[in-house]
Image (tube, rainbow, N blue to C red):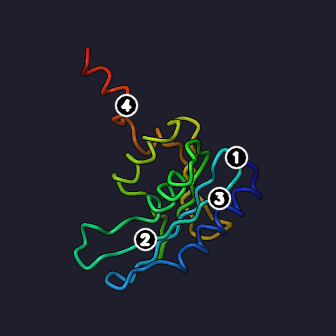
Amino acid sequence: MTEDQIRALAAEAVAAKEFSYSPYSGFRVGAALLAECGKIYRGCNIENAAYGPTNCAERTAIFKAVSEGEREFAAIAIAGDADDYLYPCGVCRQVMAEFCDPDAFRIFLVKDRDDCKEFSLRELLPGAFTAADLEKGKR
């Protein structure tokens, strides 16, 4: 991805925070998921009083894309109300592993549109449990 494309994806993640439903924590998170076709899907965190049903911004973006027929993704940018970079939780990383190539998929942690850290999914989720592990269990 070019620097301009990364900045644009980061700006989409920052903008997605505005739709956050976070009345309990007050902590907004936005994500922007880039499909291989070039379409961007935004997601935000959606809290619930029971806490367990709360959904992270990353999963909101992925589930939205998958529900619209997308299955191939290039990158995701994540921005939150933090003074530091906001890493995806373990559940979100596992959902990414379901749909994304661990070496090719890029994860951008966004402080602002001009300040991002970049990782591959494999760097953030080494030894991920995938469909291949299910096949090994059938042997």
Q: Secondary structure at mark 3?
A: strand
Please say whether residue 116 is visible from this viewpoint: yes
- The residue positioned 50% from the left and 36% from the top of the image is 102
Amino acid type assigned to the residue bearing label 3 in the image: Ile
Label number found at residue 40 = 3
Does residue 19 sit above or below 42 in this rendering?
A: below
Q: Quadrant of residue 10?
A: bottom right
C-alpha distance separating marks 4 and 2: 27 Å
- Where in the figure is residue 20, as x and y percent of width and height? 47, 77
Q: Dots 4 and 2: beta carbons under 8 Å?
A: no
Does residue 115 sit above or below 38 in this rendering?
A: below
Say left or right for 120 vs 22: right
Question: Quick one: label 3, few (<14), some, or many (20+) residues within 10 Å?
Answer: many
Q: Dots 2 and 1: beta carbons under 8 Å?
A: no
Amino acid type assigned to the residue bearing label 1 in the image: Cys
Amino acid type assigned to the residue bearing label 2 in the image: Asn
C-alpha distance separating marks 3 and 1: 9 Å
Q: Secondary structure at mark 4?
A: helix
Amino acid type assigned to the residue bearing label 4 in the image: Ala
C-alpha distance separating marks 3 and 2: 17 Å
Instruction: Name the residue that disc number 2 marks.
Output: 45
Instruction: Name the residue that disc number 4 marks.
Output: 131
Instruction: Name the residue that disc number 1 marks.
Output: 37
- Where in the figure is residue 81, as x and y percent of width and height? 47, 76
